[in-house]
Image (cartoon, rainbow, N blue to C red):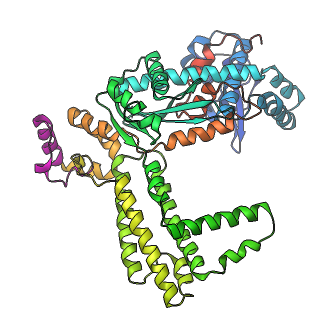
């Protein structure tokens, strides 16, 4: 029934509207009611008791009969969670809430409204301990929801790497990829401090204990991606071997970024010496303003070599950047590597014909050389490119893949595909569906298999998803370690990083509504 309250029902805000849990925002069109419990902003015409009451009763039914002071307490709790969430996302010290955010907020409210409104903010507890507890609450909520999503997916792949923090403690980061909402989702899983040693058994036991604690089975794991460290891939005692023993359905992938770095590292002696000279010069100039080392560049052939190194490193950096990022699958990463290998071969052919336009700086420096110098330069570059190609072929050997049907569903020769007969029949039927062919061209590969065809072609789609799930790099772990450096500094070296890292790195948004409802008071004893 309509609420016949005696106060004004005009379009302006009335303080009595707080009984329904509403404050307001103001824009060019006037005042808009905003729910202090869920932050939803309603339209101008909703500034009526009946509509505000309807929102309270439908969206926050458990609070509809609560007095205003209870709503205000809930508002204060919601504010604490929002502030704590921003602090964690920006990886800032917890004390910044009380030292900076609250005073700044009071200053702004005082200028925009008045002193009495600013004084109300003092009732919101934002101490270091309060912010820490709210971050722990959000971390637990994110962990619960992330685990539920992984279990619902049925399969997952892991990416892990190990490093040290500011106190030289070994820290392991683990990310997970699984199916959620019709696509692949990459998610921070956990961080583990390795308190004693960093052997393969220590790393495996740490991950194994975490998975057991949240009810995840190794049988669900279909992929593991690591770098090439001995503790990870040791032939007899590596983490990967231990995981593959427990996860028979999993495959191991050596990080593409790590392999690319190793392949590019080895150089012919002349170029290696040139690079060392350049590094010495740069370091010397950094230490002083004296540039007497410039004499090292009086050799025109040496300058040409430096120019070539700048050009080839620029190409390698471009490849490295293209392999980084989220959402990549094995197919597209191998395509990038194969394309680069073909470019190396093409460059070597061009250099043998005295053509250097693909390296503009080297081309310009080469123009200054005499015939003998050009021959030396050409021989050096050709030798290096051939060696570079050899190393790329070694670390990225060409493979005959029997799963190209996943990305070339409508063009591959079906006679060359080895699948169980029931899945072969599904593949034939699917490849003849013109409607799905159009969809295949419009959406991402992962979305097509995870969502578009999953219900009708379950067995075939599940096989495809298992191949798409494994990470191609440990890029996310490297990003995580960058966040760790920001979080755990020499001034915060005793911080327990797990909760802050989870909130900072996770793409799952905490369920603020549930978290606020779970708290009866805005502040607890410290």
Place residue 77 in its image quadrant.
top right
As drawn, 253 above or below 236 = below
In the rendered view, does 258 fall on the left or right side of 396? Answer: right
The residue sitting at the right extreme is 115
Start-end of magenta stretch: 407-432
Measured as percent of width and height from the top left, residue 246 is found at 34, 24
Residue at 55 percent across and 83 percent down: it is 364
Residue 52 within the segment the image draws in magenta: no
Between residues 131 and 191, which one lies in front from this camera angle? 191
Q: Is residue 360 left or right of residue 180?
A: right
List the single residue furthest toward the front: 269
Q: Position of residue 57 (x, y in %)?
A: 57, 16
Q: In the figure, residue 392 lies in which quadrant?
A: bottom left
- Any part of residue 28 in sight: yes
Rendered residue at 29%/28% (across/down): 248
Res 110 → quadrant = top right
**Quarter of the rendering occupied by the N terminus:** top right
* Picture mark count: 0
Percent position of residue 319, x then y:
46, 59
């Amino acid at each position: 029934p309509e609420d016949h309250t005696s106060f004004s029902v005009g379009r302006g805000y009335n303080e009595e509207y707080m009984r329904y849990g509403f404050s307001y925002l103001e824009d060019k069109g006037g005042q808009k009611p905003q729910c202090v419990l869920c932050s939803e902003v309603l339209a101008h015409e909703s500034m009526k008791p009946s509509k505000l009451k309807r929102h309270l009763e439908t969206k926050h039914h458990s609070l509809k009969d609560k007095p205003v002071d209870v709503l205000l307490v809930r508002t204060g709790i919601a504010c604490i969670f929002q502030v704590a969430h921003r602090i964690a996302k920006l990886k800032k010290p917890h004390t910044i809430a009380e030292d900076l955010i609250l005073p700044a907020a009071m200053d702004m409210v005082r200028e925009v409204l008045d002193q009495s409104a600013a004084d109300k903010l003092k009732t919101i507890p934002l101490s270091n301990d309060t912010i820490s507890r709210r971050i722990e609450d959000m971390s637990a909520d994110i962990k619960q929801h992330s685990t539920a999503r992984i279990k619902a997916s049925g399969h997952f792949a892991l990416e892990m790497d190990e490093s040290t923090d500011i106190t030289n403690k070994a820290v392991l980061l683990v990310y997970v990829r699984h199916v959620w909402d019709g696509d692949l989702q990459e998610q921070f899983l956990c961080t583990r401090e390795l308190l004693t040693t960093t052997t393969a058994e220590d790393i495996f036991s740490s991950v194994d204990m975490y998975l057991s604690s949240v009810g995840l089975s190794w049988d669900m794991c279909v992929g593991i991606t690591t770098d090439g460290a001995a503790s990870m891939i040791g032939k007899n005692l590596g983490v990967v071997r231990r995981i593959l023993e427990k996860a028979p359905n999993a495959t191991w992938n050596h990080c593409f970024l790590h392999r690319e770095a190793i392949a590019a590292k080895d150089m012919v002696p002349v170029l290696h010496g040139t690079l060392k000279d350049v590094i010495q010069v740069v370091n010397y100039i950094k230490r002083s303003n004296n540039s007497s080392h410039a004499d090292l560049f009086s050799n025109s052939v040496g300058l040409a070599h430096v120019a070539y190194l700048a050009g080839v490193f620029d190409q390698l950096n471009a490849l490295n950047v293209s392999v980084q990022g989220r959402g990549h699958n094995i197919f597209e990463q191998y395509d990038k590597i194969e394309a680069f290998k073909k470019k190396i071969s093409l460059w070597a052919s061009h250099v043998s014909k005295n053509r250097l336009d693909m390296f503009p700086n080297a081309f310009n420096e080469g123009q200054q050389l005499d015939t003998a110098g050009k021959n030396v330069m050409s021989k050096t570059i050709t030798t290096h490119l051939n060696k570079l190609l050899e190393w790329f072929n070694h670390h990225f050997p060409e493979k005959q893949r029997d799963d190209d049907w996943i990305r070339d569903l409508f063009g591959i020769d079906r006679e060359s595909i080895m699948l169980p007969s029931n899945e072969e029949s599904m593949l034939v039927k699917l490849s003849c569906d013109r409607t799905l062919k159009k969809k295949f061209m419009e959406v991402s590969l992962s979305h097509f298999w995870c969502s578009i065809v999953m219900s009708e072609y379950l067995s075939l789609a599940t096989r495809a998803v298992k191949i798409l799930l494994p990470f191609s790099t440990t890029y996310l772990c490297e990003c995580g370690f960058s966040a760790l450096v920001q979080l755990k500094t020499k001034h915060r070296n005793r911080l327990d990083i797990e909760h802050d890292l989870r909130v900072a790195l996770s793409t799952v948004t905490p369920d603020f509504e549930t978290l606020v409802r779970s708290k009866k008071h805005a502040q607890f004893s410290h």
